[in-house]
Image: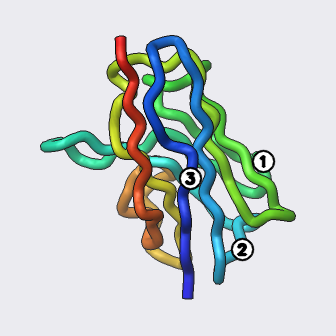
Amino acid sequence: QVQLVESGGGSVQATGSLRLSCAASGYTVSNNWMGWFRQTPGKEREGVAAIYNGGGGTNYADSVKGRFTISQDNAKNTFYLQMNSLKAEDTAMYYCAARSGSGWYGPLDRRTYNYWGQGSQVTVSS
């Protein structure tokens, strides 16, 4: 059974930093696309960053390029989202995601992923 367990959310002031972690069990992160998404009330879940094959491929939403970094530690079967220079508009529930043979809609499209973490709230105050 695949489980994705997130940690690391919280509250921070604008320009601050947070790191989210997603520990996978029943799933190998090294040879699959893994992603981070976020969602605010009334809006669709949007792709923030995705990584493949230990960083051989990464994708970022334009809104976070240069500020967020996705990475993975294959030995720990865990991947991360380092968020720097946070802005109030980054406030959202963040979800990690993994795919396993599902349809391909692109690395930042939520339809590509079929496993999801429980969500971590990130709140940035201005």
Judging by the rendered image, the residue that carries numbered circle 2 is 28
Please say whether residue 103 is visible from this viewpoint.
Answer: no
- In the rendered structure, which amino acid carries the disc numbered 2? Thr
Q: Residues within 10 Å of mark 3 (few under 14, many from 20)?
A: some
> In which quadrant of the rendered image does the C terminus lie?
top left
Judging by the rendered image, the residue that carries numbered circle 1 is 56
Mark 1–mark 3 distance (CA, rounded to whole Å): 24 Å
Occupied quadrant, residue 88: top left
**Residue 106 rendering spot, x and y as whole percentages:** 47, 53
- Residue 7 or residue 37, whichever sits in front: 7
- In the rendered structure, which amino acid carries the disc numbered 1? Gly
Query: Which badge, 3 or 2, is on the more N-terminal residue?
Result: 3
Where 5 falls versus 125 (above or below)?
Answer: below
Please say whether residue 36 is visible from this viewpoint.
Answer: yes
Mark 1–mark 2 distance (CA, rounded to whole Å): 16 Å
Occupied quadrant, residue 29: bottom right
Task: Give the label, 3 or 2, closer to the camera.
Answer: 3
Q: For mark 3, give the secondary structure.
A: strand
Query: Which badge, 1 or 2, is on the more N-terminal residue?
Result: 2
Judging by the rendered image, the residue that carries numbered circle 3 is 7
Q: Residue furthest bottom?
A: 1
Where 101 falls versus 17 (above or below)?
Answer: below
